[in-house]
Amino acid sequence: MTLATIRRAGPRPYPPRVSAFTDRFWRALADGRLLTTRGKASGRLTFPPKPFCPFTWEREVEWTELSGRGTLYSHTIVHAAPKAFAQLAPYRVCIVDLTEGLRAAGALICENDPRIDAEVEAAVLLHDDGPLLGFVQ
Amino acid sequence: MTATPCIIGAAALPVGRYQKPRDADLQTLERELLAGVVIDAVADAGVDKSQIDAMVFGLEKSYARQAYFATFMANYLRLPTTAALSEVTGNGMTGGLAFDQAANEIALGRAQVALALGVNLETAVPADEHLDITIRHTGDVDFHTPFGLTPISWYAMDAMRYMHDTGATRAEIASVAVKSRAFATDNPLAQYRDPLTLDEVLAQRMIVEPLGLFEVPGRADGAVCIVLASEDVARGLNASYLRLRGRGFFHEGAHQINEVPNDMTAYVAADAAGKAAYDDAGIEPTNLDFAEIYAPCTITEVLASEAFGLVPRGRGAAAAAAGETGPGGRIPINSSGGCLSRGHPPWVTGLYSYVEAAEQLRGRAGARQINDAALGMIVAELGNYNAALVHIFEAVR
């Protein structure tokens, strides 16, 4: 499933680091796809992606695509922001439970009052210097 | 063979603002603040400097100019140590870990007298610059921090979920700030002592929704020293002391959120560490006369009070609003005033909790004294209560 892309002017306020391993995640996200890894033997998904299975510590993992669908577990609006985020404040953030049974945090894009336990969809927040993960309700 | 660690003395600076801006002509030096507190604490304990075998410091904030502070202070105080000299860290748990490590030196028989101590100066650093650093402590710097998740934003999301699940109101949660202030009014170490009403709490500007200015901790500096001893030493001093009766620890193996969805507001680490400590002490939560709980925000105290079995699950906010955890209540929580009113110099906040226990269990807490206080619980935590460290003390008089 291709995620919606939302254009964001300017660079990311606090850009994540990219490793040779996580590069694949960030490139896919820029293309509108949400990836993670699972242990080959355990079959267990983890998020964020890791070069091993954190449950069994096996080193053989495979990449898999997530649906990007989930429900809103919680959310807030940050008013007192770090200096790096001053331009954005106040801004929404959230915790989401993905349908695949994973919990993730991200930016929340929501025009009305967010509804906990209601559906959300992952989206790409495409800044000038790269993508961030967001959720839309 | 293990010895029983006891608290025989304590001293602390009133929580406040001590740090000076970098360009000020006259600076506040960590060494001077802490040395004064050490001398007071050791005098309170009634031991001689030469009896001290170990010093465990909470790590200083990165703003401190003097690095390797523990060895610097060993020189400044002219204090050789035979058992241990170290600096420990664990974010919000730092003060608790300093006490825990000092207690270990006593328990192992390596030290007869040990100090757990620390100084935390940060108030001259503007809040937004400070947050640029602390956002790296409470989240994955590559997968959380890029969204601007501040340390207390996680607690705020606890609050949003808790209100959704239980129907608790923001006003009920905010009542924790009111009862904390009622305690702090009588605590000479407290940063905020003016009476406070619920209306005033609710009228403050939002910091991170649904938490307003008075529901989150203010900026604070502080310095603390706790004097521990073996029970042999404690008995010989002809003064009341605190015996460590139980200890529990649990880290849930998750950093802020669990990638496997769970009930985030259950504070599973508090539940597990609390049960371990109750078992170790051979008590039930109902036996406690008070609890001093590391809780930076109103909601944190609510959820921890539930997880430790002090109030029923889902009733923590209502219990606080009904006065059950306040002055004269069924189970007083944070009689010092807690992070919200006693104040929150984060990396020594944990140590301030042992000061309150020492005051309450030696019957020296003045107007906020809990009647016949005999058994108290001290808790330190980190992250979004991803870990908890619990000590249970009994009074020996």
Image (cartoon, helix red, strand yellow):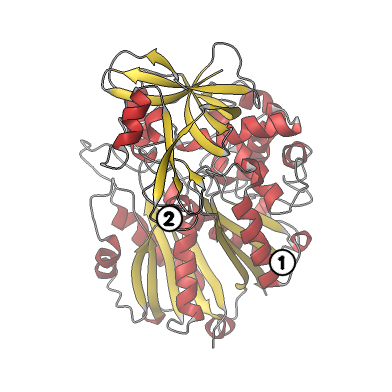
Between tags 1 and 2, which lies in front?
2
Horizontal arrangement in the rendering, residue B380 relative to residue B275 (left or right):
left
Label 1 sits on what residue type? Ala
Q: CA distance from mark 1 to mark 2?
A: 29 Å
Label 2 sits on what residue type? Gly
Establish whether labels 1 and 2 are both on one chain.
Answer: yes
Q: Image quadrant of residue B215?
A: top right
Q: Is residue B185 visible?
A: no
Horizontal arrangement in the rendering, residue B90 relative to residue B236 (left or right):
left
Q: Residue B155: x, y in percent?
A: 56, 37
In the rendered structure, the residue with mark 1 lies on which chain?
A: B
Horizontal arrangement in the rendering, residue B338 relative to residue B287 (left or right):
left
In the rendered structure, the residue with mark 2 lies on which chain?
A: B
Q: Residues at badges 1 and 2 in contact (C-beta under 8 Å)?
A: no
* Image vertical order of residue B258 relative to residue A133, above or below: below
Query: Mark 2 sits on what residue?
Result: B90
* Image vertical order of residue B270 relative to residue B392, above or below: above
Q: Give the farthest residue toward the front.
A: A41
Residue in the picture at 24% in, 69% down = B75
* Image vertical order of residue A130 relative to residue B348, above or below: above
Residue in the picture at 32% in, 39% down = A22
Query: Mark 1 sits on what residue?
Result: B374
Q: Residue B303: x, y in percent?
A: 66, 44
